[in-house]
Image (cartoon, coloured by chain):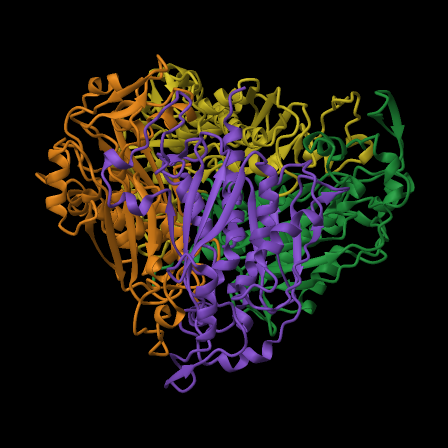
Chain colours: A green, B yellow, C orange, D purple
Amino acid sequence: MDTFGTLFRVHIFGESHGECVGAVLDGVPPGLALNVEDFLPDLARRNPANLAGTTPRKESDIPHIKTGVFRGFTTGAPLTVLFYNRDVDSSKYEYLRATPRPGSADLTAKQKYCGFNDYRGGGHFSGRLTVSLVAAGVVAKKIVPEIRFCSEVVSAGGSKDVEKEVLRALEEGDSIGGVVECRAKGVPVGLGEPFFNSVESVISHILFSIPAVKAVEFGEGIKGAASRGSEFNDPIVSVKGAKATNNSGGIEGGISDGSDIHLKVYIKPPASIAKEQRTINLDTGKCVDVSVKGRHDACIALRAPVVVEASVAVALADLYLVKKAYERE
Amino acid sequence: MDTFGTLFRVHIFGESHGECVGAVLDGVPPGLALNVEDFLPDLARRNPANLAGTTPRKESDIPHIKTGVFRGFTTGAPLTVLFYNRDVDSSKYEYLRATPRPGSADLTAKQKYCGFNDYRGGGHFSGRLTVSLVAAGVVAKKIVPEIRFCSEVVSAGGSKDVEKEVLRALEEGDSIGGVVECRAKGVPVGLGEPFFNSVESVISHILFSIPAVKAVEFGEGIKGAASRGSEFNDPIVSVKGAKATNNSGGIEGGISDGSDIHLKVYIKPPASIAKEQRTINLDTGKCVDVSVKGRHDACIALRAPVVVEASVAVALADLYLVKKAYERE
Amino acid sequence: MDTFGTLFRVHIFGESHGECVGAVLDGVPPGLALNVEDFLPDLARRNPANLAGTTPRKESDIPHIKTGVFRGFTTGAPLTVLFYNRDVDSSKYEYLRATPRPGSADLTAKQKYCGFNDYRGGGHFSGRLTVSLVAAGVVAKKIVPEIRFCSEVVSAGGSKDVEKEVLRALEEGDSIGGVVECRAKGVPVGLGEPFFNSVESVISHILFSIPAVKAVEFGEGIKGAASRGSEFNDPIVSVKGAKATNNSGGIEGGISDGSDIHLKVYIKPPASIAKEQRTINLDTGKCVDVSVKGRHDACIALRAPVVVEASVAVALADLYLVKKAYERE
Amino acid sequence: MDTFGTLFRVHIFGESHGECVGAVLDGVPPGLALNVEDFLPDLARRNPANLAGTTPRKESDIPHIKTGVFRGFTTGAPLTVLFYNRDVDSSKYEYLRATPRPGSADLTAKQKYCGFNDYRGGGHFSGRLTVSLVAAGVVAKKIVPEIRFCSEVVSAGGSKDVEKEVLRALEEGDSIGGVVECRAKGVPVGLGEPFFNSVESVISHILFSIPAVKAVEFGEGIKGAASRGSEFNDPIVSVKGAKATNNSGGIEGGISDGSDIHLKVYIKPPASIAKEQRTINLDTGKCVDVSVKGRHDACIALRAPVVVEASVAVALADLYLVKKAYERE
């Protein structure tokens, strides 16, 4: 099910080497000023030019707004945005068809969809789909303009010297994982629900839909599991809930507490590497080594900050609208 | 919204010091043998008697099946199970009313619900509600009998010597966090969806609804963010998808790959400690120190394995039913 | 799936001859004054004493509020209400087990649930479940206090002389259908969505969940299908949308237009009659005649006005909360 | 919310005079043969050439499959289909901007969306959107190939002599309503749920999303409300549930009973007529008469059979997939 959200609902679709990818955004409030240019800065952050460790493929990241915007403003009707695919050469993927890449969805996709999946470039499983998430994030941020986001790669391959690590991996025909941190400032108190729609539940749900994300931590959650309450609990210092520390990452009991929402996303290394990896040939049943030719992202985490941020924005925009429904006049 | 699931749907309700807590389970297949005794082993695991670091409160963990079971079998209609609360003395919480415990939902709950929340013992935010999750897990496991679960506390307070750490924290009037590991064996290939309902998305959604969970990691996700692709990618060794390693935790591209689903849950230390903590008096607006009297769980992680396992079972049962809908005859 | 609603969500459960029926109401705003007495007037309307044509079974229509209310106000947490079943004698249904009543769910229930359904008194399919709907309606009305409802039986057995028709049917050991009209006054403009959540879609969805409802008409919909636009279109007479007539039943383009929402519900005659009806004996495969002994509702439409009204209230309360989420400050 | 369905989910979008309308279909099983030609017969039925009483606008009813189909088969990923708008002249709608047409969504749309709605040609409220429903129906029918549909206009303007009535209305510059009947044969036993997802609930939900539908009747529901049980109840004549009559329209207790699902949809006359109608000028606040120039559908019911049928197919396909999830091996 490619739908996320209760009131602000994001539906994404498309394939890496098909005609396009895109999103339908439902539940967008009417009257938000929105044009193509509004999308470009975040889209550019996802597709950094000349960045070592990212692929040079010139994806056409121009959003085509098809529905839901009229004379520069959202109408309240579903907003459809498409991104056409360009510069795709599917032929080079053919040799991979029988030899699923370790660490990829090649085999699970084939099994789940009985071989009918569009396997070219990862098809619907491709990171290309994150362009739809970024587009959704742009609209989400307009729904919650008081929230400001800041996101960055804080380590790659285990080191804070990200650029150096990426170059080394590239040279070795290898790839590396990374950690992305995201902070949302200005979040109102009271988003989220005690149980199944806790802020952590809703945000993690969408974050784990980003390909390659394998762990999500709120605040100092991992350190907290090794800590004492007297160290970890955040002292409250004002009747509105200001706190002396923010180990909880801005969420207490599943509810936003007014402090920054702060989280970390752990991203695995990309599956496509030049180095030989052991896999199976599905036609012959024999073990083979596969080496993925061409240039690929050595560190997908480099593109991820804006995708993480967009995902958090989508989740918060949805929770914000739900909260509004319960506001007392 | 206290509902989880697409086909197997769990609704939970109740308060710590109200009359009862419970669950309505909707979408339960008819014909599953089910009686009160089936619930007892898992319920006992959640409420370990005489375990240092857990509270001695004798909760009445007897499930009362109110609807949905007829002559020992599920009927296909909604299954309602109640747990009556016993042994509750709310008076001792009154002094906490104006002084929210740091690290708890006391203040966010009050703010979100405009002061109408039942604050006694944490009310609807209480860990008491996890008894409903455990009950849901018992039924979930009957939906996917081929999946076997095993869960345990792997560290507490940063140490593998869990018991010793817990006793030390107790002596100091403090609490400690812990890490729970869960493994699901026998998971069929093909559960989950590429994006918003990836296996990780669905499982993390329910796991983060467990109070005190602050991080969730699939496979070796955290180590993976510091690794190279050549180390992390799991070599495929059979046409059915058997792998030489399982760093991915049994999920590739959001889809179960047939290996064990393997995850870790990072649980923060409980908020209620005897040690004094700085907070605010909401009536006077002055900073005060609060010390939570009585005996409380020093390490809530000790009770968590069966809750984590139940949550994973609920998520997998739901994904399993969805998968069945798409099976080709 | 026994769940209705997007924000105000109603889950119902229970069986006619089981221990209880009830509802969990999720998404109830905090701070609504609510006690047991609030439920009694509407519950009494559903179960009219000494009314010819309704069964004398003294159902225990006392609501037991189990969760979600604290010191007389809703808390914002799920509200659970139970109704215990009394005065049930299941033995008299045993002879019906092999001979499904024509016009009932006896056979489809057995087929759908592979024989595991609780068949006693209709089980989960029973009209007894409408007590849960009425309870949900009581809470819904508190969410939209500005909306006033009025509902009545406008005909039975094709005649406006309802009481006479009912008595005649009773004498003949037969049953009759009826038509219930419901009007909601004071509905704000702008509820509903253009397509799948049109006001008509949402209201009809819940109305058709009431057992025995077989047609739903908004405004003068049936006459409208035989009319001309110049007769049917409602002239607009004020800039706020007041209209000279209300053939549309208060809904234009799926959106409430501020006029009364006006609808009719067509209810079939009850299946249980003393007159012999042809059916099949499932054990022998032979045609037999079945006569349902004892006293049964001769005209279930007599109990329906408050159930219809409650259902409309639930739908409008949900649409109202969704609308609030999009209000511009 | 422009989404319908639990497993087979239809999202529709677009505006009458915008660039396009379309649908994203999520939850489509992989491996269904599907190409552009498959859509054409049903699309042609919606847009009958040279039919008196329908507009001559040459809509471009060519489906553009953008995603979800690969080498002639559905992939299991979301299926996106677009229909570009052609032959639109919005200028002629400008004079209507301040004078909402009686019987239309002109005013409610403006009120709901605070004036930001695309009002040209009805915008997102237009009947043009039903092309998306028809497309969804084509795919739905492939999910349930054993079900055969047949639909027709059974009366218009109150007469069975449909063509004559339509011509008379046209001559008078007026419009007329009509009744569409739909029959689904070969429906498996056991679709639907006892309460909120009864077959009637789910089907009526989508039927009432079709613009101009104001009443829905299952089987002989309206006659049934004036009948006796001994007349209306359908005698059961085989252990599998075959019935001597089908007054229930193939649904007992909300569950399909294996007989034809049979329903009638009551459609109001179109709002746009040449005859003068009383309305308000929103700018001046004065009453005015409005006459809608140009050619418009005199009887929208003529186009409706395939739209009704598609909607029923979408509902049944969704219920069918849910049922499959619960099938016992």
Q: Quadrant of the N terminus of chain C?
A: top left
Q: Residue at x 22, y 25 (%)?
A: C276
Q: Nearer the viewer, residue B119 or B134?
A: B134
* Figure check: A65 above or below B246: below
Image location (x, y in percent) of residue C37: 16, 45
Dividing the image into 4 quarters, which one contains the C terminus of chain C? bottom left
Q: Is residue D87 above or below residue A309?
A: below
User: Is A198 on the left-hand or right-hand side of A83?
Assistant: left
Q: Quadrant of residue B238?
A: top right
Q: Nearer the viewer, residue C260 or D239?
A: D239
Residue A227 picture quarter: top right
Residue A219 visible within the image? no
Residue B125 % position (x, y): 39, 40
Q: Residue at x 86, y 57 (%)?
A: A50
Q: How many marks?
A: 0
Q: Is residue D2 left or right of residue B12?
A: right
The residue under the point 77% across, 35% down is B227
Work out whether A107 lies above or below C4: above
- Residue B33 position in % (x across, y down): 42, 16
Q: In front here: A103 or D61?
A: D61
Q: Is residue C235 visible?
A: yes
The answer to which image quadrant residue D20 occupies is: bottom right
Image location (x, y in percent) of residue B155? 58, 25
For this orientation, the residue located farthest to the left is C50
